[in-house]
Amino acid sequence: MSDYLLMAVSAIFVNNVLLALYLGNCPFVGTTKKMDTAVGMAGGVLFVLVLAGLITWVIDVTLLRGFDLIYLRTIVFILVIAALVQFVETFLKKMVPPLYKGLGIFLPLITTNCAIFGVCIINVRKDFNFMETLVFSVTSAIGFGLALVIMAGLRERMATARIPKILEGTAITMITAGFMALAFFGFMGMA
Amino acid sequence: MNNIVKEFTKGLWAEIPPFRFVLGLCPTLAVTKTVETGIGMGLMLTFVLVFSNILISSLRKVIPPSVRIACFIVVIATFVVIVELVSQAYTYGLYQKLGIFIPLIVVNCIVLGRAEAFAFKNGVVASIADGLGMGLGFTISLTVLAGIRELFGAGTLYGIDVMGSSFQPFAFMVSAPGAFVCLGLILCVMNMFGKAQDM
C-alpha cells in the first residue's frame, strides 16, 4: 500500500508529468488562458488517460508481448488512443450530454496530447503491473490537472498585470512555467 | 521554382518552429540538455516530416476528408516506427538518451499540423520543400536552445569542454525549470523581431 502512496506522491508532485517529464506542453500553453478551459482539459485528460492507460496496458501484455509484436507498439497505441477518443466522444454525446458539453471541444485535442501517449508508453516500458498502471495513470492525470489549474490561475491574474511588450504571449507563459517547475522541485525531498 | 524556394525558406525563419510556430514544445524542452540529443531529435523529426508529407500529399486525392486525421496518424506512425527501429540498430546511445521521445514524434503537433495545413492541400514537390524547411528549422531551433543550455549548464558543446576548468556549471540550465525559462527568453528575443504566432 505504501508503495502505491509513494508512487502517487511522486507522480503528482515530484515527477509531475508536465513540469518534470515535459509531457503535454501544447495543451498547457493552449488551454490555460481561462480557468474553465483548463478545468475542462484537465477533466478530459483524467478521463481518457485512465481508460487509455488500462486498455493499452492490457493490449500490450496480452497481444503484443504474447505474439512478440513489441515493435508495433507505437502504431497500435496511437490507433487505440485515437479510436478511444472518438468512441468516448460519441458515447458522451449520446449518454451524458452535460459532460459532453463540458469536455466536448477538448476531446479531439486529446488524441495528440503527448501526456496520454507518453504515460501509456511509460506504463509498459517500466513493466508496471495492473494496479501500478492504474495508480500511475490516475495520479499522472491529477498532476497534469493540478499544473494546468495553477497555471490558469496565474495567467488570469497576469491578464490584468502590466507585462513588458516583448514578453507577452507564450514567452511569459514559459517563464512562469519555469518558476512553477522550480517550486515543484521543492517536493524533491518527499519521495 | 521561386515558389518551392519560398516554401523551403519560410520554415527557416518566417515560421521557424517552435519559436514562431509555437508547436511541438515537449521534445523542444525535453531533449535539449545536450546538443547531441537536440540535433538527433531534429533530424529524426525532419525525416518523419519529409516522408509523411510526401505520402500524404501524393494520397491527398484518395484520402476521404472525413477520416483524414486517422489516415495522417497511421502514415506518421509508420515512419516513426522506421526511425525508432533504425536508431535502435545503428545509434543505440542516442536511442537510449532520447527514450520515450522517439515514439512521441507520433503526437508531435508539428508533423500533424504540416500534414493538415500543407501536405493535404499542395503538390508533392512543394510538400517536400515544406517538410524539409520546417524540419531543418526545428533542428536549428533545437540546436540553438541545446547549445545555450549545454554551454552554461555543463560548460561543454557537443561534449567538448569549451569553458575551461575554472568554469562553475550553472546546473539550473540543464534542469526542468531551466528548460522552460530558457525557451521563454528565446521566445522573448524572437518577439523583438515581430510577434510570434499565438496558439
Image (cartoon, helix red, strand yellow):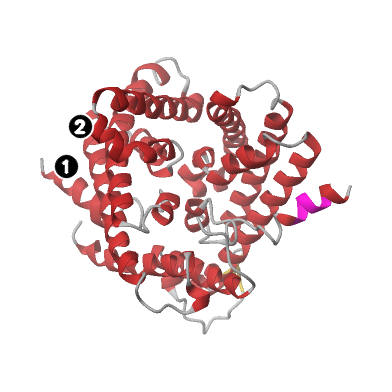
Examine the residues drawn in magenta and state their main secondary structure.
Answer: helix
The residue drawn where x is 42% and y is 56% is A29
Specify few, some or many for label 1: CA neighbours under 10 Å numbering under 14, 14-19, or 20 or more.
some
Q: Nearer the viewer, residue B172 or B23?
A: B23
Q: How crowded is mark 2: few (under 14 residues within 10 Å), some or many (20 or more)?
A: few
Q: Give the label on residue A131, or none.
A: 2
Q: Nearer the viewer, residue A107 or A146?
A: A107
Q: Per the image, is B8 magenta?
A: yes
Is there CB contact under 8 Å for labels 2 and 1? Answer: yes
- Picture residue at 57% right of the left edge, 57% below the top: B18
Q: Where are the magenta residues, as a range? A: B5-9
Residue A34 part of the magenta-drawn span: no
Q: Distance between the residues labelled 2 and 1?
A: 9 Å
Q: Which residue is drawn at 41% across and 29% down?
A: A81
Query: Which chain is mark 2 on?
Result: A
Query: Is A146 on the left-hand or right-hand side of B22?
Result: left
Q: Is residue B31 visible?
A: yes
Q: Mark 1 lies on which chain?
A: A
Q: In this view, does A101 lie above or below B39?
A: above
Say which amino acid is labelled 1. Tyr
**Residue B34 coordinates in the image, percent (x, y):** 55, 61
The x, y position of residue A86, in whole percent, is: 40, 26
> Which residue position holds label 1?
A4
Q: In which quarter of the image is residue A178?
A: bottom left
Q: Which of marks 2 and 1 is nearer the N terminus?
A: 1
Q: In this view, does A26 lie above or below A58?
A: below
